[in-house]
Amino acid sequence: MTLQRVIPAKAGIHQISPYIILSIFSFFALISPSFVSADAKSDYDFQYGQYRQNYPEYALLKADYLNTPLSLAAENFI
């Protein structure tokens, strides 16, 4: 095999389309982790706010559950 036939064959293997490179880069950009700047206090404030916002509904559902006899709940389920 002559040198003129070998060089173009090797060059064809190593040529990569810019679209392939762009798609590989965008794939890794999509799966990279997002950056979140949160600390313990902001996390606590968020969770406490969620608790205070949803506590009345939780208290109502819990009171309803405790006031419903188990036999009545089973009859309504069937």
Image: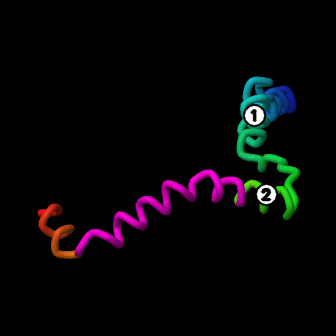
Which SS type dominates the magenta stretch?
helix
Residue located at (80% from left, 29% from top): 15
Magenta segment: does it hold 55? yes
* Mark 1 vs mark 2: in front: 2
Where is residue 17 drawn, in percent x and y?
76, 25
| Residue under label 1 | 26
Q: Which mark is residue 45?
A: 2
**With 47 as the anchor, is 40 left or right in this view?**
right
Residue located at (22% from left, 75% from top): 70
| Quarter that holds the N terminus | top right
Where is residue 28 drawn, in percent x and y?
75, 42
* SS for callout 2: helix
- Say which amino acid is labelled 2: Asp
Asked if residue 68 can be seen in this view, the reply is yes
Asked if residue 5 can be seen in this view, the reply is no
- Say which amino acid is labelled 1: Ser
Magenta segment: does it hold 37? no
Q: Which residues are magenta?
A: 48-69
How many residues crowd around disc 1 within 10 Å: few (fewer than 14), some, or many (20 or more)? few
Where is residue 6 drawn, in percent x and y?
81, 33
| Quarter location, residue 73 | bottom left
